[in-house]
Structure formats: C-alpha cells, structure tokens
Image (tube, rainbow, N blue to C red):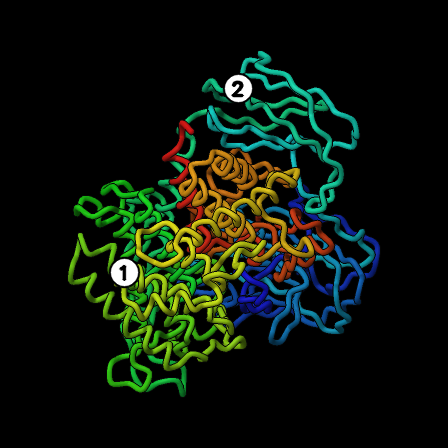
Amino acid sequence: MDNANSRRRAGALAIAAAVALATTAIATSPAQAEGPELISNGTFGNGHAPWWGTANITLDSSGGQLCADIPGGTVNPWDVIVGYDGVPLQTGESYDFGFFAAGDPSKVARALVQLPVAPYTQYLSAAPELAPGGAAFAYTFTSPVDLPSAQVAFQLGGSVDPWRFCLDDVTLTGGAEPPVYEPDTGPRVRVNQVGYLPDGPKNATLVTEATEPLPFTVVDSGGRVLTRGTTVPRGLDASSGQNVHSLAFDGLRRAASGLTVVADGETSRPFDIDARIYDRLAVDALRFYYPQRSGIAISEELRPGYARPAGHVGVAPNTGDTLVPCQPGVCDYSLDVSGGWYDAGDHGKYVVNGGISVHQLMSEYERGLAGRDATLAIPESGNGVPDILDEARWEQEFLLSMRVPAGEPLAGMAHHKIHDAAWTGLPLMPHLDPQKRELHPPSTAATLNLAATAAQAARIFKRFDRAFAAENLAAARAAWQAALANPEMYADPNDATGGGAYNDAEVSDEFYWAAAELYLTTGDRTYRDFVLASPHHTGDIWRDRGFDWGNTAQLGRIDLATLPSTLPGRSEVRRSVLRAADGYLATLDAHPYGIPYAPAGNSYDWGSNHQVVNNLIVLATAHELSGSKKYLAGVLEGMDYILGRNALNVSYVTGYGDVAAENQHSRWYADQLDPALPNPPPGTLAGGPNSSIQDPLAQRLLTGCAPQFCYIDDIESWSTNELTVNWNAPLAWISAFIAARGDC
C-alpha cells in the first residue's frame, strides 16, 4: 500500500487493471483500422467457433450475435467468461480493439486482452457498461510483449442476479496510432477548491509560459472584482514539470462563496471564504471508518447509500473471521478476529496499519480536537462515550484479538495480519468473499504496535471503561515483554498473496514509540530509561517523506512533546518538534505549490498525500507548542494542495471541490465498475501521486510522468488511487485541528 514494497500482485487475478485509453463509440460498429484482422469470426454470421465459454453458460449464435444467459450468484468477474484464443501480439505494436455488446439488465463487464495462463497479465483491460439496447465500444492499446497466442476474454461474473449478454462485430487490428494519455487539468489557475479561512493565507498557482509578473483579479459569483494583484514568477517546478507563478490574496477576509481567480486569460474553479469550511470535513473524514468496519452490518439509516450485510462473520459464502486458523505450519490454534476495519480496498486487516490509524484517532481525542458523543452517526452514538473513541475501540478490540493465546510459546506477541488466502477481483462485497481466511505469523512490529496503542488506550479509556483500560494495560505490558524476547521477528516480504506484506525489518522506531506510550501511561522508570537511551529520542527522525506505518518514532516524539510527564529533558523534545516544523515550513515556502513535501530525488511515495498531511501534523503540533501563527499558516497552505492547488487541479478528497477524486480502488465502493454500488463516502482521501506507479494501468498511462502527474482517478490504479484507514486518520486529525481554529 503506502511504500515502495508493492502490496498488490500485478496479475489479473489480483485486480483487472486497465492498460489502454478507451472511448465509447456512438456508431453501431467500430471502424476498421489498417492492419490484418486478428479475430477470424467476430460477426457470428455462421456459428461462433472458435469462441468458447465457461461451463456455466451456453453460447448461442443462432440470431447472428453471440449471446449467453449469465447466471446469478457468482462472485468474481472471471467466474463467467466468453473467450477467444490464439491472438498474435507484437512488442511495441499498437492495436485497435472494438466490439458491439449489450446487457439486459444493464451490467458492467470486463473486456480483456491478456496472457491466457497464470498470472493472466493484461495488456488491455476495460470495463464497458452494457445496456439493453447495446452500444459499440472501441479501445486502443500497445502490446509490451511478443506473444503468439494472446487471449480475448469477456469476464461476465460477479452478479447476484442473472442477466443476458450479447456480443457482435468484434475486431482486433494492428497498425493503430499509439495511445497518448493527457489528463484534463482544467483551468491553469489552481486554487483550494473548498476554500480559505477569512484570516488565513490565500494562495494559488498559475501555470503559464510567461516569465514576467502578470496581473490577476479575484471576482465574486456576479463578476464583481474584489481585489487585484500581481503574480510572482517561480520558474520551472520540478515536481510538475510546469512553469508556474504564485499569487496571494490574503487581504480578502470577508466571508463569500463562489469566488474565482482570473489570471492570464484563465478562470479558476470556484471556492469560498468561510471560517467553518473544515467543520464538515473533520466529521466526514471520521465517518469514513464506520462503512470500513468488518463483522457488522452497515445500517442504511446511519449511512444512506452504503448499507450492506456484515462481512466475514461466517455466513456463507464467507468462511468468516470468527474462527480463523493460521497459515499451514504457523500455529495449531484458531482465533476469533472478527471486527476491526478493512484496511483498504480489499478485505485484509493488518495490525501495523491499524496501529497507526487507531493511534491517530485516539490522539485526535487526547489532544482535545474531538470529544463529543453523537457526532459520527455510528451504532454507539448516544452511549455517553465520545464517538471518536467508540470508533477507535472497534479497531483496538480487533488488535487485542490478534494476540497469541496464553500458554503458547509466543504468548503476548501479535499476529501480523489476517486476510484471504488468495486475491479476489473487483467488485466484491465483503459478505460475498468466499476465500479462506488465514492468520499470518506474529511479528515484532505488530507486537509493538499493539503495545503502543494498548498503552494509549489504557490511559484514554480509564474514565469511560476501567475494565477495558485495565485489559489494554495488561496487554501492552505483555506485548512489550514479548517483543523484547523476540526483537527480530520480521514479516516476510514475500508473504503477499491475498494481502499486502507490510514488511518492516527496522523496528527500533516501534520500540521507541511503544516505550514512549507505556511511559506516558505508567510513569515507570523501565520505559523512561528505554526512551532516554533510544537513538530515536535525540536523533533527526523527521523524514522529508513524513512518518507512516513503517516509520513511527515520530509518534512517540510528538506525544512526549505534547502530553504531560516528568521526562528529563522534555523541553529539548519540544524544541526538536519546532525545529522539524521549521524544516517543513521552509520546504513549503520554497515550493511553488506550497507543499511541505520534497522527497529525495523528487520521487513521490505510495500514499504521498497522507505523508503530506502527516507533515502538516508536525506543523500543527509546533503551533500548539509555540503559539506561533506561522505554523498554522503552513498547515492551511499545505491543505490547499490536498484540496485542489496542485498540478492536476483535482481535490484528492471525495465530495470536496468541483473536481474531486471519486474512483478510489475498492472492492465495494466500486461504482465505476458497477453503477449499483456507491463511490467512496465523502471525506475519503485518495493515496495520490506515486512515482513508482506499480499497477498496470498507471504503468501504461503514466510512464515518464513528472511526480505530481503520477496519479489517475481510476479504480484500477491501486498504486496511485487507493483508499486506506491510515490515510484518512491524519486527514481527520488535521481537519479537526483547523476546524477548532476556524477564526485563526
């Protein structure tokens, strides 16, 4: 997920990944391109050989089209296939692929050109939406291989209800113009599409070839000019490859809506000026978690449009998480690990990713940013406990359930993860997942995540549930001792079938974080001495790339700086946070898009957006510690990038801004593949630009991309457009921080 270790298998069984540009034609038949026809019987005028179908369908070409009744109740797209074998492909050759197809009732199918054997690598993957009246579809792709016998496959499974599929006029020819992907970036003036605080900074970026300053205006929704100014040329921006100017309009302090910036003949997307613009986002970013829950039915009343049955509770076809065995050879017991959050767009649950996520939710409460009951519309609302803690508890109870049982040789350790034994396709609702579930080996990293979050939960929940707090404290102490006894049990980097590896062979930072949380909760000398002796306590831990699940020392340092204790040298800990914030602020000031993120080599990480936001949390902490408004201004300007002031001119948060990410990679928020399913809920953060572009769609469309352009809002781009619990956690935290300071 969010590092260079690719967590997803690139084969077709992992995810169907589109590798071509596609357009839907209006004509009843696609145009023939130059080059020989590679489909020998695409019109079905005399039968349908050599086309074939899976055993669960009967092909019928008696009406001049190839039709089949598709059974309901299948799970994966590849459970029903209509195919054609023996298509020769040549390296570097571009092909036009077209067909006429209908679905009654309407369905989304998969149209593939692929390797016919495992790993079923796809050279073209498209998701045509089929309607009863039918339509022609046309696609272009370039083959990366010489292959004498590629396969054309229409994957038609995964529907609960039966439907009828018809196909005609299938054509595949070489000699096509190579596809070129050009993202639609809209107007060249880039703004925060949500808006700005009245007393906060107001910055925008202009993409232009001009090298001299240019005039600009800010106008209201009626066209009245509110202010004028002059841009500041910034030259070539290495993160985007664009020549850009910066502009500021801080003097506008009156609340207004529908404003735009006009510069160099371009008009920006609209935005507001309002002290309360982050209030809703602070709530929505937290409401994201309830529909991510495993082991509970999602209520239509609480989340209209997102209701679904409980996932992985042992109701067929699920094997369930209520009694999960280990992988073969790992252990001889089974655990009830139901509950918790699905990590991302799959059905896996991971302790290290859950650990940082639940920590940041509890931290949001502990730092006074959220503390009210009945705010998140969750089943526990109204129970007298702040909703954010009820949501955090859902995950923390799962983390506790991942412990090796008492009496076992590794008692106190935590299993690293639990997920399917094999990858599943998209879309797939959690309750329909038929895969066997498996516990994976314990790890030191997972155990220390448990120690840290359980210690934090012990002190936070003490006023609400003393028994739960005591359970967490006992678990934290036991996990700490187990980690000390097993300090080098690392997750296998090759254990990535059916779920991500989340491997981490450097756990000294987790030791530091866990010791810090245990010390803050207990005050014990043992943990204090470990903190003081750790190289992470005084070293420069503030990475340019920000902290994440694999780099957690910063979590300990921030808590030691902000929470009361008698730690010797605490004033220096606080100063270290201020120095870190000054560094991020300098990076932001130097960047023409105002980003506190400049990774070495200008190489953006998997999940770069959440690393940007985590760096903003350091700035926010510095503001808390010092009261200096320069850090608050940095937080606000950094959020401009997330909400639209970026090279792609897109808000990376679903439901926020005129043009926002909405097709994040998910098996159940899969509207792009099945219109009966929803998009991700409002307030969902997309992973964002990723220079490594590990998925086939991104590799085909984005190869050679400048860092900020290494993103595409497509459900198939799991390396740039994933959603995860540990990306929304910092978004919720920083939005709550800003909402609490709306009047600056």
Asked whether 638 or 673 is in front, the reply is 638
Q: Is residue 109 visible?
A: yes
* Residue 636 x, y percent position in the rendering: 50, 36
Q: Nearer the viewer, mark 1 or mark 2?
A: 1
Q: Which residue, given by chain and number where applicable, does mark 1 sit on? A: 521
Q: Name which residue type carries label 1.
A: Thr
**Position of 83 relative to 213 (above/below):** below
Of the pair 428 and 486, the residue shown nearer to us: 486
Q: CA distance from mark 1 to mark 2?
A: 46 Å
| x and y percentages locating residue 732 in the rendered image | 40, 45
Callout 2: SS: loop
The amino acid type of the residue labelled 2 equals Leu
Q: Residue at x 51, y 66 (%)?
A: 80
The dot on residue 356 is none
Q: Residues within 10 Å of mark 1 (few under 14, many from 20)?
A: some
The percent position of residue 91, horizontal first and vertical second, equals 79, 66
The residue drawn where x is 68% and y is 53% is 602
Q: Position of residue 551 (x, y in %)?
A: 49, 62
Query: Is label 1 in a helix, a strand or a loop?
Result: helix
Disc number at residue 252? Answer: 2
Q: Residue at x 40, y 41 (%)?
A: 624
Frontmost residue, 536 versus 724: 536
For mark 2, does the 10 Å Cα neighbourhood hold few (<14), some (14 to 19), or many (20 or more) residues? some
Mark found first going from the N terminus, 1 or 2:
2
- Quadrant where the C terminus sits is top left
Please tell me how many numbered marks the rendered image carries.
2
Q: Is residue 591 above or below residue 32?
A: above
Residue located at (47% from left, 19% from top):
256
